[in-house]
Image (cartoon, grey):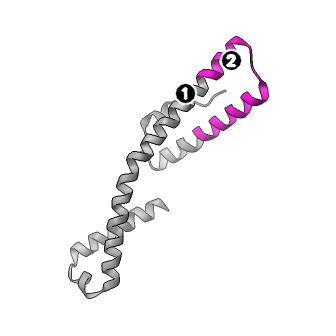
Amino acid sequence: MDLYFFIGLVVVPLGAMIHPKIIWDNFIVFVMLILSGVLLFTFVLTIPVNRMVLTSEIQGFKAVVQVVNTDRQEGNIENAALKLKIAESNQWLAKTQYYAQIFNWHFPREVFELEAIK
């Protein structure tokens, strides 16, 4: 979905630049051009925010790994709560790594260095 949306944002302004007369002959094309410009601007602004959120979630995952390793070494493990947290963290990691393979140009490279908690 995002790929088609991005392609649409690029194709409409590109077509308007190739044939500028189309903009003034058809009001709908003009509205689509303005809308695609606004959406493209919004899209460009959301990339840094997305990277910031992902970076903070990566740090959270590393903290969970550290807590799990510390608890395993000390032997004070509450099995049910720990397994639930491990499952949630591994689920987040699997989902993030999957999307990072598809949209790798705006995901931090650090995502690929993380390993699932065992």
Q: Position of residue 117 (x, y in %)?
A: 63, 28
Find residue 85 and report its image quarter. Answer: top right
Q: Is residue 35 left or right of residue 110?
A: left
User: On the image, numbered disc 1 is attached to which residue?
Assistant: 62
Range shown magenta: 66-93
Which residue corresponds to the image point at 75% horizontal and 30% vertical from the top-left? 81
Q: Is residue 82 above or below residue 91?
A: above
With respect to residue 37, does 66 lie above or below?
above
110 within the magenta span: no
The amino acid beneath tag 1 is Lys
- Percent position (x, y) of residue 22? 25, 83
Q: Is residue 25 above or below residue 107?
A: below
Q: In the picture, residue 12 is in which quadrant?
A: bottom left
Q: Position of residue 52 (x, y in %)?
A: 43, 40
Q: CA distance from mark 2 to mark 1?
A: 14 Å
Decide which of 42, 89 is in the foreground and name it.
42
Give the residue number, with chain letter if any, for mark 2: 71
Q: Residue furthest bottom?
A: 25
Residue at image x 69%, y 35%?
87
Residue 105 shows in the view: no
Disc 2 element: helix
Along the line of sight, the residue nearer the viewer: 27 or 111? 27
What's the amino acid at mark 2? Asp
Picture residue at 35% right of the left edge, 76% below the top = 32
Could you tell which of marks 2 and 1 lies nearer the N-terminus? 1
